[in-house]
Image (cartoon, rainbow, N blue to C red):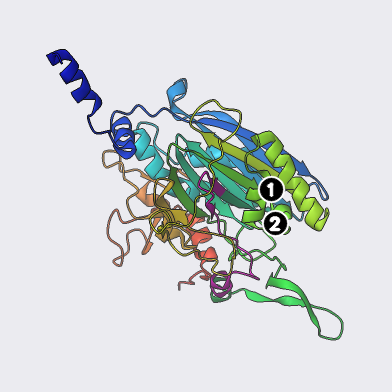
Amino acid sequence: MSKGELSSRTRMKAPPVALATLIGRELRNDKVEKPFVKYGQAGLAKKGEDYYLIKTDCQRIPGDQSTAFSVFAIFDGHNGISAAIFAKENLLNNVLSAIPQDISRDSWLQALPRALVVGFVKTDIEFQQKGETSGTTATFVLIDGWTVTVASVGDSRCILDTQGGVVSLLTVDHRLEENEEERQRVTASGGEVGRLNVFGGNEVGPLRCWPGGLCLSRSIGDTDVGEFIVPIPHVKQVKLSNAGGRLIIASDGIWDALSSDMAANSCRGLPAELAAKLVVKEALRSRGLKDDTTCLVVDIIPSDLPVLPPIPRKKHNMLTSILFGKKSENSTNKSTNKLSAVGVVEELFEEGSAMLAERLGKDFPLNKNSGIFRCAVCQVDQTPGDSLSGNSGHFFTPASKPWEGPFLCTNCRKKKDAMEGKRPTVTA
């Protein structure tokens, strides 16, 4: 046997490289490309108050296609359509205006959760200034590469179905009937929670907030209801593996009829456009058309395939069943709300507090050269003489420290206090 043959056989017998090692090398070498995003939409109207937003051509840096991201949202209006239309037309711009333009992609993604809170509250303030009384839920989904960020108020939902068959809830229902934490917050802020009283003193229907009789504890709009019905969203940010996943975003007309697992199972393995139609069809078959039913199906896939490739479910294995994630604020929800930690989903952020100061933090900067402050919500520049308020009260009171935030203009401070049930302080 020649030396060449020996070395050839020696090379053939070299131990194989583990798949995980190969994937790790690819990730370190940044060879994993951005995913393709495919989507479908379907719906049937009973009241005509559902609206949706699909925008796949957004850019972090205008004119730079490499900074593209996609937005999908559903707005389920009530007491009219004005709030849903207004949110559809203004929410995205209000979110983006709260993020500096000259930052890296990683910094941009880290800034998104706070910017979403700002955008929701700003949209609510602007709509209430119109003097109209309608309201809307909002489930707003932003996809940048493999990172998915979801913000929501109300009871429209977004679920994530991964190739491993794990169905995860990315939103929290803000229904008074089901969310005890929200009931406690509303009553602590000055609202009353109870059912509708009919003739004879009998109570009927779901739990509602009074005044107004709204079943939800969070929404955009609803000027005829107490300010303790807040527009501050629950926000969750996750990063998918390069195996991809499917999002199902839908109004409560779907979720009143189907569980998260039922919705995912009804359309798994089908193209997104057909999948959305089948989810709606399954909801109608189960419950009939009792409410507007709107569904968006979004596939985030690693290559330009017509459908997310299905992977057979494996038998139970202790390693692959390791789960993590915060417990949902809505502990009564029976849907799966955990994310697999092994190669499927990485949870980056989750917060649902209704306290604005907790969500905005204290690091909104001051332009020290000009002495100008920027309101953390409305993004309007203020000078110290404009009665600027901070976290601890009026800006230049002994109780507050200079440059302690979040800085709020007078109008936004009043909004914050009203949402927390605080009454204006009368001074002599």
> In the image, what residue type sits under mark 2?
Leu
Mark 2 or 1, which is nearer the eye?
1
Q: Horizontally, is 50 left or right of 102 in the view? A: right
x and y, in percent, of residue 69 in the image: 50, 32
Indicate yes or no whether the magenta region holds residue 176.
yes
Q: Which residue is mark 1?
A: 266
x and y, in percent, of residue 10 in the image: 19, 24
For the point 59% across and 55% down, the residue is 153
User: Rounded to the nearest whole Å, what is the CA distance between mark 2 and mark 1?
Assistant: 10 Å
Question: How many numbered callouts?
Answer: 2
Let me know if residue 49 appears in the view: no
Let me know if residue 383 appears in the view: yes
Which SS class for mark 2? loop
Q: Horizontally, is 147 left or right of 395 in the view? A: right
> In the image, what residue type sits under mark 1?
Ser
Image quadrant occupied by the C terminus:
bottom left
Indicate yes or no whether the magenta region holds residue 121.
no
x and y, in percent, of residue 279 in the image: 71, 46
The numbered dot on residue 335 is none
| Residue segment shown in magenta | 160-184
Q: Nearer the viewer, residue 139 or 85?
A: 139
Q: Nearer the viewer, residue 380 or 316?
A: 316
Image quadrant occupied by the N terminus:
top left
For the point 51% across and 65% down, the residue is 329
The numbered dot on residue 258 is 2
Picture layout, residue 181 above or below residue 53: below
| Label 2 crowd bin: few (<14), some (14–19), many (20+), radius 10 Å | many
Q: Horizontally, is 110 left or right of 161 in the view? A: left
For the point 38% across and 44% down, the residue is 110
Specify the quadrant of the image occupied by residue 133.
bottom right
Determine the residue located farthest toward the front in the rendered image.
1
